[in-house]
Amino acid sequence: MIHLEQLTKYYGQLCAVDHIDLDIDKGEITGLLGPNGAGKTTTLRMLTGYLLPSSGTIKVHGYSIEEAALQIKRLIGYLPESAPLYYNMLVYDYLDYVATVRGIERSRRMNRIRTMVGLCGLNGIMHKSIGELSKGLKQRVGLAHAMIDDPEILVLDEPTSGLDPNQIMEIRDIIRGIGKEKTIIVSTHILSEAEATCDRIVIIDKGSIVADGSTEMLRLSMGQEKKITLSLLNADIDRVRERLLDVEGISGVEQLGEPQDGELRIRLTTQGDIDTREKIYRSIRETDWIILEFSQETKSLEMIFRELTREV
């Protein structure tokens, strides 16, 4: 569906996008993650034909951006971070105007507008001025704009930026609903949004792709190390280290703070893909220690993101 090969963009001497290779299949919701300045927006602007690459290949449905930019633009609905709305227009007039510009015949225009009203939750505001709307409603109008001609691909650049938690949930639900029928690329640095909304996550840092896959695949690719937190009564750290370091798969025992009211908190580091929890429990059961807490931590998307994009 979408093929990027050795895609590169320079601004003067600055390399904003550095030889990116990426394929996106039909029907995927792909999250493009990265810190500010990572190259996300530049990549999307090249994909949508707003910017030309310095080098590399962009193909959408077999069309090349260099030879068939107009055909590619007809396949894509694009919502930039700041939705390009005309604040002095009524919502209805604006959507009718956009539908006209996008070449929708008059006989189909009203039906498309009605569809967008239902999909994006615009009931009750169609005869309001866009400038009077909240940011969340403006984003909905922007989504309706991007989808008015029923594009196969939807590109959303930071669609929830600046919204409150309720508005974020509303936009997330809309994206998930659209994703049942469309190929969607969402640029964001809100990690919970990507994890909750996207089928696939691509992390970009300094213009290069540093990770690509589902959240679970990314966790596996970052290694099999796990952390287990224990709270114990009647235990001291020396005896705990001596006993638990003998358990297969345990590579480290760390004390967490000073004991409080006889409660010792520790964090165990485990290596490999073996589940060590049963062995830990059986080893402790042979002592007079009392388990107050026993929990295993898995790497969150935030932890993975930080490891991949932190400054070295």
Image (cartoon, rainbow, N blue to C red):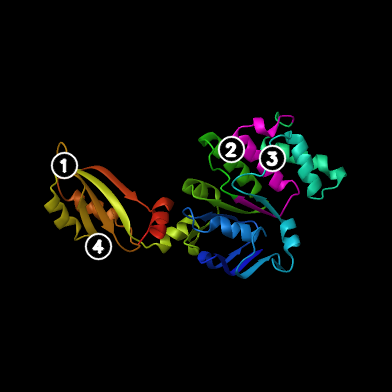
Residue occupied by mark 4: 248
Compare marks 2 and 3 and give the one earlier in the sequence.
3
Residue occupied by mark 1: 259
Compare marks 1 and 4 and give the one earlier in the sequence.
4
The kind of secondary structure element at disc 1 is loop
- Gap in angstroms between the C-alphas marked 2 and 4: 47 Å
Q: Residues within 10 Å of mark 3 (few under 14, many from 20)?
A: some
Residue occupied by mark 3: 119
At label 3, which amino acid type do we have? Leu
Left or right: residue 301 compared with residue 89: left
- Gap in angstroms between the C-alphas marked 1 and 2: 45 Å
Left or right: residue 193 compared with residue 278: right
- Gap in angstroms between the C-alphas marked 3 and 4: 54 Å
In this orientation, which residue lies closer to the viewer: 247 or 266?
266
In this orientation, which residue lies closer to the viewer: 154 or 214?
154
- Gap in angstroms between the C-alphas marked 1 and 4: 26 Å
- Gap in angstroms between the C-alphas marked 2 and 3: 11 Å
Q: Are marks 3 and 4 in contact (CB under 8 Å)?
A: no
Q: Residues within 10 Å of mark 4 (few under 14, many from 20)?
A: some
| Magenta range | 127-156
Corner quadrant of residue 233: top left
At label 1, which amino acid type do we have? Pro
In the image, which is nearer the foreground, mark 1 or mark 4?
1
- Say the numbered circle drawn on residue 170: 2
At label 4, which amino acid type do we have? Glu
